[in-house]
Amino acid sequence: MSGLSLRARGAIAGSAAVLLAVVAIGYTVRAHPGPAVTTSSTAEAGTASSAAEADAVRDDGPRLRVLSNGVLSTVSLKDPGGPRTLTPQRCDRAFAAADTIACLRPVNPLGATQLAILDHDLRERRSIPLTGFPNRLRVSASGRMVAWTLFIDGHSYASGGGFSTRAGILDTRTGTLVDSVETFAATVDGRPYRAADMNVWGVTFTGDDNRFYATMSSDGHRYLVEGDFAARTFRTVTDGVECPSLSPDGTRIAFKAAIGGDPARGWRLSVLDLATKKTVALAESHSVDDQAIWLDDRTVAYGLQRSDGTNDVWAVPADGTGGPRLFVSGANSPSVDGSGV
């Protein structure tokens, strides 16, 4: 996503409308100092066209959907640095899986937001008015379940208590809408729990379209929780996990770990083994304030923002080896079309 740090945006903090746009485009604390990469073959190339038309013309295998300056775009997963196809859709956050594309877009700078559910041909199936600033977005692998997170108060997870979120879930098959996951019955360390300072964000779905993982914060803790949509419950799994992303094989969680337990110091991209609870810090040394995705069972991708505000998508091995590599320049909010994790 990619961080919501406002330190790099001080010059434009006075304008609410511009601030909203920046919040949605990028979510990192600091950026890779590497050279700027031009996208003359992509954003400068073109005229907007539908993703369906592009896919019909270019049979080059799996596609990666990204936002290019807020424009929903696709690029070949085999050649992420190659030509990019732009669509007419503009979003602050986007995510695609199966035949479902979810798009969060602001309606006005005061916090009115719209969730648009599109099909593969970009036809709108449903739109939902929301209140808050677009933050996180996920679609389950089947395309059935959609989850989002909005900031209601504040614009950074680095603040100890100066933010408030609202995470919602939509079942696109039945039309069931849960406006806030915080209404679910919570269990912390095996005991029923309720607190006024509870926040939930960063939903990621399992393969059964019912269970999910998310972050729940309360009383200074940022827990990984496992939820049951049908039962309207969630329980804590472990502490210190933010913005989880479940691996395609369902065995690991990619997440951001607060450095020294202090979010104000930034985050280290990490992977948790759900069976052993062992954590591996990945080779990315920059602070990553994003809900990463899995390109496959071996590779994690995420957004970083340069010092000039430009967003890029990077990739790094999920086992802690190797090093980060630039995956898609001038883009954020990636998703593997058909993956959904």
Image: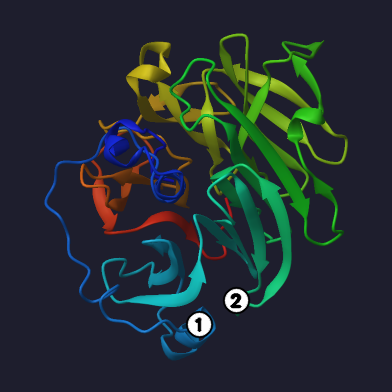
Q: How many numbered badges does the structure rendering display?
A: 2
| Disc 2 + disc 1, Cβ < 8 Å | yes
Within 10 Å of disc 2 (Cα), the crowding (few <14, some 14-19, many 20+) is: some
Within 10 Å of disc 1 (Cα), the crowding (few <14, some 14-19, many 20+) is: some
Near-viewer residue (174 or 22): 22
Residue under pointer 1: 50
Question: In the image as oriented, which residue stretches furthest toward the bottom?
Answer: 57
- Does 18 appear above or below 182? below
* Relative image position of residue 5 (x, y in whole percent): 37, 33
Secondary structure state at the residue bearing disc 2:
loop
- Does 65 appear above or below 136? below
- Does 204 appear above or below 171? above
* Relative image position of residue 196 (x, y in whole percent): 73, 15
The reply to whether residue 141 is in sight is: no
Near-viewer residue (162 or 334): 162
Residue under pointer 2: 122
Q: CA distance from mark 2 to mark 1?
A: 7 Å
The reply to whether residue 38 is in sight is: yes
The disc, 2 or 1, on the residue closer to the chain's N-terminal end is: 1
Horizontal arrangement in the rendering, residue 9 relative to residue 250 (left or right): left
Image-quadrant location for residue 178: top right
Horizontal arrangement in the rendering, residue 51 relative to residue 75 (left or right): right
Image-quadrant location for residue 80: bottom left
Q: Which mark is residue 128?
A: none
Horizontal arrangement in the rendering, residue 296 relative to residue 131 (left or right): left
* Relative image position of residue 103 (x, y in whole percent): 58, 60
Q: Residue at x 23, y 45 (%)?
A: 306
* Kind of residue sitting beneath label 1: Ser
* Kind of residue sitting beneath label 2: Leu
Q: Residue at x 42, y 36 (%)?
A: 4
* Relative image position of residue 227 (x, y in whole percent): 74, 33
Q: Residue at x 40, y 40 (%)?
A: 27
